């Protein structure tokens, strides 16, 4: 499992969407539209799944520490 990530259009920094999914499953999903709060610029950003990615590194590191 990994976190779906998008990029803040104002700062260019990565944003965690709060949605977790397996990367293979995410790649098979139809394109969808969502909205996420950005802690960097404190705005809500609208995004398409086609512009998102799954970051599995963070989840893997957390489970290794447990």
Image (cartoon, helix red, strand yellow):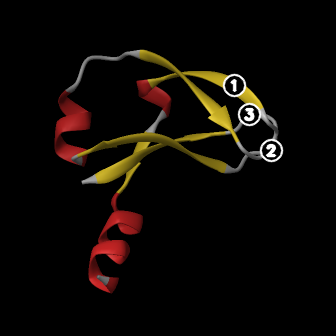
Q: For the residue labelled by badge 3, is the local secondary structure a helix, a strand or a loop?
A: loop
The quadrant in which the C terminus is found is bottom left
Q: Are marks 3 and 1 in contact (CB under 8 Å)?
A: no
Residue where numbered disc 1 is placed: 44
Image check: 15 left or right of 30? right
**Mark sitting on residue 34:** none
Number of residues whose C-alpha sits closer than 10 Å to that of mark 1, classed few (under 14), some (14–19) or many (20 or more): few
Pick whichever of labels 2 and 1 is earlier in the sequence.
2
Q: Quadrant of residue 10?
A: top right
Real-space Cα distance between discs 2 and 1?
13 Å
Q: Front-most of 23 and 42?
A: 42
Q: Residue at x 45, y 41 (%)?
A: 18
Real-space Cα distance between discs 3 and 1?
11 Å
The quadrant in which the N terminus is found is bottom left
**Mark sitting on residue 9:** 3
Residue where numbered disc 2 is placed: 11
Q: Residue at x 17, y 37 (%)?
A: 25
Real-space Cα distance between discs 3 and 2?
6 Å
Q: Quadrant of residue 61?
A: bottom left
Front of the two marks 3 and 1 = 1
Number of residues whose C-alpha sits closer than 10 Å to that of mark 3, classed few (under 14), some (14–19) or many (20 or more): few
Number of residues whose C-alpha sits closer than 10 Å to that of mark 2, classed few (under 14), some (14–19) or many (20 or more): few
Q: Is residue 16 above or below residue 55?
A: above
Q: Residue at x 28, y 74 (%)?
A: 63
* Percent of width and height locating residue 6: 55, 39
């Amino acid at each position: 499992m990994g976190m779906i990530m998008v990029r803040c259009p104002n700062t260019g920094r990565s944003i965690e969407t709060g949605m977790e999914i397996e990367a293979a499953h995410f790649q098979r999903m139809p394109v969808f539209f969502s909205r996420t709060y950005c802690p960097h610029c404190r705005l809500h950003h609208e995004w398409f799944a086609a512009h998102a990615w799954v970051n599995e590194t963070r989840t893997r590191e957390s489970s290794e520490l447990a």
